[in-house]
Image (cartoon, rainbow, N blue to C red):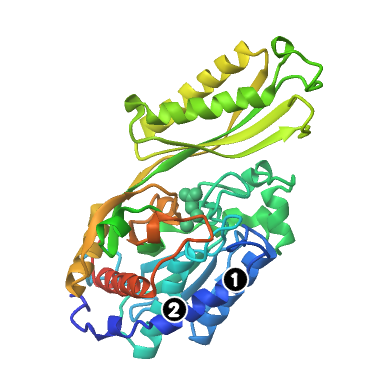
Amino acid sequence: MTTRASGAADQAVDGGRIDAHLAAFAELSEPGPGCTRLAYSPLERAAHAVFAAHMAALGLRVRTDHAGNTLAELPGAGAGKDRGDGGDGDGGGDSRAIGTGSHLDTVPSGGGFDGIVGVVAAMEVAEVMVRQGVPHRRPWRFVAFAAEEGARFGQACNGSRMAAGLTGAADLAGFTDAGGTTMAAAMAAAGLRPDLVDASRWRPEEWSAFVELHIEQGEVLHSSGVGLGVVDVISGSTRLRVRAEGRATHSGGTPMHLRRDALVTAAECVLLGDRLARDPAHDGVRVTVGRLTVEPGSITTVPGAAEFYVDIRDTDPVRQRAAARALAADFAGAADARGVRLATETIADTAPVVLPDRVSAHARAACADLGLPHRVLPSGASHDAQQIGRIIPTALLFVPSHGGLSHVPEEFTLTPQIVAGTRALLATLRRLDGARV
Ligand code: GLV
Ligand code: MN
Ligand code: MN
């Protein structure tokens, strides 16, 4: 039995409410271009409070866990019961939850859609379910994950990793932001209990399925004119911190053959990364150096030190790790040739995840039920769904990113596209509510 026959609910998804939520979250930003609401900052916590207040006003039970994830639950008709008859024959009865959600933090000078769209869609789905009294069997859980962006601490998807048991309390002092604050300290300053995050691990046996809606952050949907994507595989990422130490000396007094210029070495490493990623032997890998600092940073001093971060992404874990190893070796060779000392450290490593077709099939069928064209595509970015997918059957839906832009102030998705994505999300969750996955 499925409930999808009563199709009116998805028509109640309201673009005006969605726009109002997006605008409210966009207000919660540091000054400057775009939206800046960093992981475990007071602004991120304020955004979680907005989500919590909306869900509480709808009558849902809301809580924030020790990792800073905020969860709201709409009880199911079968709540508390594990139907011995198997109901849908899944042996887990109706008490196993289905869930949806995404994240509310942003990168520095990011946009107002990455992550936010999935949380706003969750808020809208909850509102439609409550207002329309949509019948459902399972508990529905709506989640705003904490600290998804790796921009502050290097590792991405922190809240969902803690929920999935992939990052624990013992790890949190090991991640540091540019100002030297550890993730544990930032969490404590935000009123959380980093020492207790292991207790916030989700129990897979409580869950049936999870679905995240997100913007694509690439241009496949935008350029093909298709409004919805169903993701089959999510890229992994390996992140390196590289420190080159040469010798700081006078820029006028030091002849070229006596220099040990750390920035020139770093520049060679940047180009080595770009070259490797364009080499057909590594086809599919993306290599980015997005942060580089130079010491002492004086116009008239040969750079004595340079530190940079390399982000290596691929949908193939073997190619991803092979690229990271090859780059570390290439970097060492480039540094040696210039008499520069080089230290390369892996600060984060997440494998790609293939999402199970048995959940994605419901997303594809939901799109078909609604007459909304979709295409199947991989995700180049990381997502909370990637981490949750390790413990719960998970699907990931995409809506288009205008011009493929993301992590910049120009990031944009049209409201009707978000409405269509939210309708597809609701229809997918309703199918899963009645399904065995
Ligand atoms: C998340 O946006 C990522 O960096 O992949
Ligand atoms: Mn995101
Ligand atoms: Mn992002």
Choose mark 2 or mark 1, whichever is in front.
2
Q: Which residue is mark 2?
A: 18
Q: Which residue is mark 1?
A: 47
Residue at 74 percent of width and 44 percent of height: 180
Instruction: Specify whether tag 1 is near ligand 2 (CB below 8 Å).
Output: no
Q: Residue 201's mark? A: none
Left or right: 115 as drawn, with respect to 231: right
At label 1, counting other C-alpha atoms closer than 10 Å, the crowd grade (few under 14, some 14-19, many 20 or more) is: many
Q: Where 340 sits versus 358, above or below? A: above
Residue at 38 percent of width and 71 percent of height: 414
Residue at 72 percent of width and 20 percent of height: 246
Disc 1, SS: helix
Q: Is residue 164 visible?
A: no
The percent position of residue 307, horizontal first and vertical second, equals: 66, 32
Front-most of residues 374 and 213: 374
Name the kind of residue labelled 1 in the image: Ala
